[in-house]
Image (tube, coloured by chain):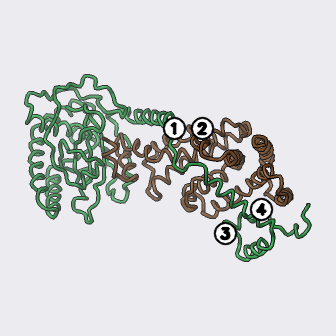
Chain colours: A brown, B green
Amino acid sequence: MDDAGFADISDQDLLAQHVAGDPDAFGELVRRHRDRLWAVALRTLGDREEAADAVQDALVSAFRAAHTFRGRSAVTTWLHRITVNACLDRARKAASRKTAPVDDAERLDQLMEPHESAEAPAERQDLHRELLAALATLPAEQRAALVLVDMQAYPVAEAARILDVPTGTVKSRCARGRARLLPLLTHLRNNREDGKDVAMERNRTQRPSVPPASEPRDAGDGDPAGVKGGGGLA
Amino acid sequence: MTSTDDTAQHPDVSEISDLTEGLLPPSRGAALRHHIDACEECTEIHSSLEEIRSMLGTGLPLHERMPDDVADRIDAALASEAEAAISVPATTTPPVSRETGAESATAPRPAGHPRGATGPGRRPARRRRTVILGTAFGAAAVGMSVLLLQSLQSSQDSAGTMAERGVNAAEKRQEGFSENTLEGRVRALLSETEASRTPSHEPDKPYLDTKSSPGNLPPGDASPRVPLRTPSVDVPPCVQQGTGRNVPALAVEQGSYQGAAAFLVVLPHATDSTRVQAYVVDAACVTSTPAAKGQLLLTHSYTRP
């Protein structure tokens, strides 16, 4: 009943109704956006529980702070911004806790959808899993930018609004993030196709050119992951 | 360095990546493109970066669902958040913000004292007022409703005059809706409409502490004796839109909220049949062109009388 009643109400009106005291409006807002917020959080954090905590924190604070919403951005942008910030906070905390490197196959499997396993060719799946593992080694800001722009296909301008930075910063984070992922990709590909030595040699020499990793283990993480992937394939 | 040719002049991977995002100054970008066109290895890098971009974007479903257990957990967290918000003592004015509608908000929020009832003896005073409302104002409200019905049946053009009349009436009677007085008015409206149908109903059921919590509370002692199938009343379409719901109204009344003309609309609660939901909607929409949906100013749910 409430679903039907809310069907033609805009997000902004729903938020206004929530602020005015309507007990059902915010729930409807959550129902509309939670899947997208979930996808972003899951990929940014790479961990189901962390992602669930982040989205929960974000929605609770949105619930409380709804009266501060000024309508300068869309409600969905606002919700994404709160969620991404919650994710970045958690990612930074996790980084400072020095949690185990993200080569935990089980955790990565959580990121792969069940139907994916059936559809995607095994090779591509492995490659993808390694890519996600590598993504988790990037600085959180680069990761968030890549998740929004490359993975979830948000326009750069929207990602900029969500991250509250200029579009140039988003592009730069994406570019740096991809550059950091490159050694891993070529490494994997070389493990698979031993023949293509041109790329391999080139990338060996190119490796040091990748911007110096702020955390040395970033560069190193690609290797164990790559070895594991290669082993699985062989 | 195993490459022999112009390795020293190869751009960094990060610079090639910057190039793909158009981040380089034009002159540097042109030079880089020139190099890449002539350099197989850098072309390879360039295409690998593109591959990474596309790989990130494929394979993962764009539209996946939040798992049910996570969704349930979040719903529960929000429900307890809502309960915490509602457990504010009823005699204080909860800081209901209207900032989202700041464009049209004219008056600062008043202190929120119930009209005519001051001091600590507020509850009894309100009950007394309920009775008064049930009689004098209730009758007036019915008069207004008739007026509304008549006006609404005519064309859209007459809506303006209707609203003016409503404003005039509101000014004369100073019928201010406020958070503290809303419940009494809702009850008065409902018991008036109800009384016309079920005269045996006793209006003195205790009303304290009946504020709703969004989790569906068990009906408790809510009596099934009064199904409250009152005839629906007409509400101006834009005001109805302001409530965000399409169900027929149980009652409607015109008055003012924070100095501006407003409608009080009472609808059945969305999920709990033992409750009603009251909405105060800005009346400005009735006269505005182009037609806009009425701004919701305040809403609360109450147990049915």
Q: Position of residue A45 (x, y in %)?
A: 63, 43
Tell me the chain of label 1.
B
Mark 1 — residue?
A: B67
Q: Which residue is nearer to you in this view: B119 or B184?
A: B184
| Structural distance between the alpha carbons of marks 4 and 2 | 32 Å
Image spot of residue B234 (x, y percent): 16, 49
Task: Name the kind of residue labelled 2 in the image.
Answer: Arg
Quadrant in which residue B125 is drawn: top left
Find out whether the residues at labels 1 and 2 contact each other: C-beta distance under 8 Å: yes
Can residue B300 be seen here? The reply is yes
Secondary element type, mark 4 = helix
Q: Quadrant of residue B200?
A: top left
Where does residue A52 sit, x and y in percent of width and height? 55, 38
Please name which of the two marks, 1 or 2, marks the residue nearer to the observer.
1
Residue bearing mark 2: A48
Q: Residues within 10 Å of mark 1 (few under 14, many from 20)?
A: few
A34 lies above or below A100: below
Relative image position of residue B98 (x, y in whole percent): 37, 50
| Real-space CA distance between mark 4 and mark 3, rounded to the nearest whole angstrom | 14 Å
Disc 3 target residue? B22
Q: Which residue is mark 4?
A: B13
Q: Are marks 3 and 1 on the same chain?
A: yes
Q: Earlier in the sequence, mark 3 or mark 1?
A: 3
Q: CA distance from mark 3 to mark 2?
A: 35 Å
| Chain of the residue under the numbered disc 4 shown in the image | B
Q: Nearer the viewer, residue A221 or B195?
A: A221
The numbered mark, 4 or 3, whose residue comes first in the sequence reads 4
Residue at 43% in and 47% down: A32
